[in-house]
Amino acid sequence: MSFTPWHTDKWFTSPWNFAPEATKEFNFAKKIKFHDVTLRDGEQQAGLVFTRDQKIALADKMAELGMHRIEAGMPAVSAQDREAIVEIAKRYQGPNDPEIFAFARCMRGDVLKAVDCGVKGIIVEIPSSDHMLKYAYKWDAKKAIDLAIDATLCAKENGLYTVFFCIDGSRTDLDDFTTMITSVAEQGHMDALALVDTMGGLAPHACNYMVKKIKSVIDKPLEVHFHDDFGLGAANTIMALSAGAEVAHTSITGIGERAGNTPYEDVALSLLTMYNIDTGIKFEKMNELSELMRKLSGHTIPSNRGIVGPTLAQIESGIVADWFVNAKDVAPLELSPYLYPLVGHKDAEVVIGKMSGIPTVNIYLDQLGMSCDSKDQKMEIVMKIKEKALAEGRLLTLGEFEDIAHSVLG
């Protein structure tokens, strides 16, 4: 078999993704980084709490996965948050380790707390939209700009890689936004600028325009921090990266404020399989990392959620079970866009439930070493499976299937 970018031995997406007419305006950076915000913005999800030791465990697992940057927290929040940041920063100082960042308000005191933690970089935030300044902060624009200049200069003076982060940037008037970022770039300091969709209100078609427009205004590396209120965080992030943004701010399985942040899993796997861009993430660790986050936090996700859902690889439908039997050994990618072990799941499996048909019966009779040549008897087994699954409201176990089979076959 000859491999193409859309069809390898591990995935099978769409050739339309690689049509020259579809890709001619792409401007992906040579190296794309993921900046994980789980330990700060992720924990802002209502009711979600990580202890110091849990944050360290998650950072260790992210390092195993190959996460490029870890935003370890906001030291001004609490002593425990600060302790976690200090420990994580100590652990990861090598050239191949993730870069450890802290998060700070545009306040010199916040910046100095981050410096004391031993981090390599800092995200410095300030509100940028006139309405948020007026209603949420009760500031004027001059105060915000002055604070931003002072805080970013403090970060520079202390040797931190500084990312300037404009809260509500996507809802800020373009002239106001331009005034703020140019003022900070010229009078303060930024090594990079984060384009921030705090309320998740950007549409995919606007992301490409936004990146290009800001690149025409300021010559700084761009990072994107998008929220998922309309379920568009991953799509928006990919569109922004295709226009030249270099760093994607994401979280584990999309946890975060309100509807959450952009999930890194969706972006990384899409880049690999739909754009032929390998970011160096160890994809086989994805499910393991998500499971750890959920175990530590008690956070739940839809069982069939893409990439990391616990029942993602299960097949219940009789029609699809028939496909599985026919194709699994010769063309397994007829059944899914990627093989589930790619992201750390077990292989696809047929389960027993209300939607089962004769192919499922054949699979499990064979597994139990039972034989049946009667189509009518097999259909009787199918109907009994449906009846019990409906009564129980769940999948059936192998033992329950065996009992049903014996009741029909004797």
Image (spheres, rainbow, N blue to C red):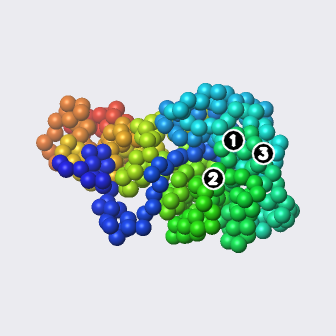
Residue displayed at 59% across by 30% down: 92
Q: Is residue 175 above or below residue 358?
A: below
Distance between the Cα atoms at labels 2 and 1? 12 Å
Q: Position of residue 270 (x, y in %)?
A: 42, 53
Q: Is residue 368 above or below residue 17?
A: above
Distance between the Cα atoms at labels 3 and 2? 15 Å
Three-letter amino acid code at the position of disc 1: Leu
Distance between the Cα atoms at labels 1 and 3? 9 Å
Tell me the number on the disc at residue 160: 1
| Circle 3/circle 2 CB separation < 8 Å | no
In depth, the one of 307 and 236 nearer the eye is 236
Tell me the number on the disc at residue 192: 2
Q: Position of residue 216 (x, y in %)?
A: 58, 68
**Left or right: 15, with 100 as reference point:** left
Residue 337 shows in this picture: yes
Residue displayed at 31% across by 66% down: 19
- Tag 3 residue: 154
